[in-house]
Amino acid sequence: MPLMTGDEYVRSLQKIKMRIFLFGEEIDNPVGNPILQPAVNSVKATYDLAQNPEYADLMTATSNLTGEKINRFTHIHQSPDDLVKKVKMQRLLGQKTAACFQRCVGMDSFNSVYSTTYEVDKKYGTHYHDNFVKFATYVQQNDLTVDGAMTDTKGDRSLSPSKQADPDLFLHVVERRPDGIVVRGAKAHQTGILNSHEVIVMPTIAMGPDDKDYAVSFAVPLDTEGLMMIVGRQSCDTRKTEGCQLDLGNSTYGGMEALTVFDNVFVPNDRIFLNGETEFAGMLVERFAGYHRQSYGGCKVGVGDVLIGATALASEYNGVEKASHIKDKLIEMVHLNETLYCCGIACSAEGQPTESGNYLIDLMLANVCKQNVTRFPYEIARLAQDIAGGLMVTLPSEKDMAHPVVGPVIRKYLAGPAKVDVMDRFKIMRLIENLTLGTAAVGYLTESMHGAGSPQAQRIMISRQSNMSAKKAMAKHIAHIKD
Ligand code: SF4
Ligand code: FE
């Protein structure tokens, strides 16, 4: 059965020789690094949960390629039910990790590349779909984690890829050889790249005929020569090097992003999924973005569940849980969170088959989902901070709490209700701090804003899908207006 355990996953990751830069130093693997290990743990959870019979229905699926039981994170969606289960799985993972568990970008690129390559081959007689199916089968049979790399660094955003002063500001083909292509460029904010076995690269925007070299998609393993990752900082990240658990809020799980550089990377022919068919770049981008906008209706909701739970506990630990405005604010948080879930489920339930046979979410509803995600987690976080109170940001350090002189003073003066263990109160304050201001705020807030496309990208899609002329015709009909 092609399912790895979490421990096997970590061991498999350790074997990959990567080129990583972190705080000005070069390291070759994320495993065991105090800054990076929590992000490894989050991906590990996607393997551990798949081993648990309680979650088998959500965490696993039957492959349409091999007929075998596989981790759902490597699945090609075969029905609206698969799409719904994907969102439920992501909510579950968000609840279990309270962090970005990173493996979704690969799943979303899988499904968008699968359907797009089918349509490219149909038009041009190319073999990209065969290439991709071979690659996907390999990933499923070995239960690999795949990063999906879309976002180019983009340079001057008023210019197309081929018009940039530096041609490398969008990833592009620099050489075509009989056995493959050589590419150069960089992908920004690559979620989970260090914790992946493979990376699928896709174009970042719709392209015109001049951008032929930029309309490229392929997959390479993480130890490919010329690949380099520069890890991005997160707010409060160095707390992870202090050896204190409490100050972290969430000491087990986290997420990570890196600027990923492709410096003359060779891609063999059978790993190429798009190579110059510019008119299909937009389709690939639209589908990947749609799937990832659906994803946020699951993962952010799961993290939201943890934040709402933490806030309810904070109200009890502050002794204010009976106040009517507190109860009402908690209801508002739940309402906002479940609204996001409604969108995630709705765009999945309305999914339709593509020409290749896999299922695509309803793009309008997926974009509405993500548009709400750019707002509601911020309001949920605001209410959490409102209820938690100022202590969340003025609490002394764990080291002070352990100090023989000031430790007892802190416990005496920062105590809440007598029945509440003061250290439990501190733990919940730190968790709320982590989720709304610390390392996890990258995943819960900033990524809600910009991940899978910034708010304006969804508004463009909503406008494109809005079918305004049909709506005007309905209004004319009701108002008895003749054309
Ligand atoms: Fe998955 Fe959410 Fe992280 Fe994207 S932001 S990789 S959907 S957990
Ligand atoms: Fe994301």
Image (cartoon, rainbow, N blue to C red):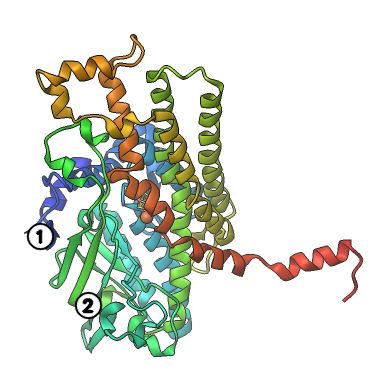
Image position of 19 with respect to 143: above or below? below
Q: Which residue is mark 1?
A: 24
Front tag of 1 and 2: 1
Quadrant location of the C terminus in the rendered image? bottom right
Q: Which residue is mark 2?
A: 268
Q: Residue furthest top?
A: 418
Where residue 136 sits: x, y (%)? 32, 62
Whichever of labels 1 and 2 marks the residue nearer the N terminus, that label is 1
Residue for point 37% across, 85% down: 276
Say whether mark 2 is within 8 Å of ligand 1. no
Residue for point 46% across, 75% down: 282
Residue for point 7% across, 58% down: 25
| Count of marks overlaid on the render | 2
Where residue 43 sits: x, y (%)? 26, 46
Q: CA distance from mark 1 to mark 2?
A: 32 Å
Image position of 39 with respect to 477: above or below? above
Where residue 185 sits: x, y (%)? 25, 76
Name the element at disc 2: strand
Where residue 173 sits: x, y (%)? 27, 83
Q: Amino acid at mark 2?
A: Pro
In this orientation, which residue lies closer to the viewer: 319 or 303? 319
Residue 211 horizontal side relative to residue 45, left or right = right
Q: Is residue 62 visible?
A: no
Q: Amino acid at mark 1?
A: Gly
Name the element at disc 1: loop
Q: Residues within 10 Å of mark 2 (few under 14, many from 20)?
A: some
Are the residues at dot 1 and dot 2 in contact (C-beta closer than 8 Å)?
no
